[in-house]
Amino acid sequence: MEEKDGAITLKLEGRIVGPWAAELDRFGEQTSPAMKAKHLSLDLRDTAYVDGSGIRILRAIYSQTGARILAPTSWAQYLAEEVTRNDEQSNAGEV
């Protein structure tokens, strides 16, 4: 996490799965209220993989903070679309 000029950038790297997703969830729960007053950016450019629980956690952080998502690569753009998709759209294909 980098804080500069009232803005926070949360740089995520590697795989957001299992215990790492749980750690991100704890981080989000502890810091989301404080981040609402600042401009949060989620930097996804160095993520390699995110499982379903990781996407749900990123979606919660995004919806609670209105974060900007940095997604310059094709994979990060796909991930950003999954994170910013609303619940109705994400549940449409589920049975």
Image: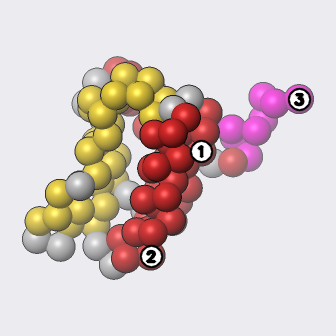
Q: Residue at coordinates 59% horizontally, 45% vertically from top-left?
A: 56
The crowding category of the residue bearing disc 2, from other C-alpha atoms within 10 Å (few below 14, some 14 to 19, many at least 20), is few
Q: Residue at coordinates 30% horizontally, 34% vertically from top-left?
A: 13
Residue 30 shown in magenta: no
Residue 91 shown in magenta: yes
Mark 3: amino acid: Val
The residue under label 2 is 33
Which residue is outermost to the left? 5
What is the C-alpha distance between the residues marked 2 and 3?
34 Å
Contact check, label 3 and label 1, Cβ < 8 Å: no
The first of marks 3 and 1 along the sequence is: 1
The residue under label 1 is 56
Coordinates of residue 94 in the picture (x, y in percent):
81, 30
The crowding category of the residue bearing disc 1, from other C-alpha atoms within 10 Å (few below 14, some 14 to 19, many at least 20), is some
Q: What label sits on residue 7 in the rendered view? A: none
Assign the N terminus to one quadrant of the image.
Answer: bottom left
Q: Secondary structure under badge 1? A: helix
Q: Which residues are magenta?
A: 88-95
Mark 1: amino acid: Arg
Answer yes or no: is residue 84 visible.
no
Q: Is residue 79 left or right of residue 11?
A: right
Coordinates of residue 37 in the picture (x, y in percent):
33, 78
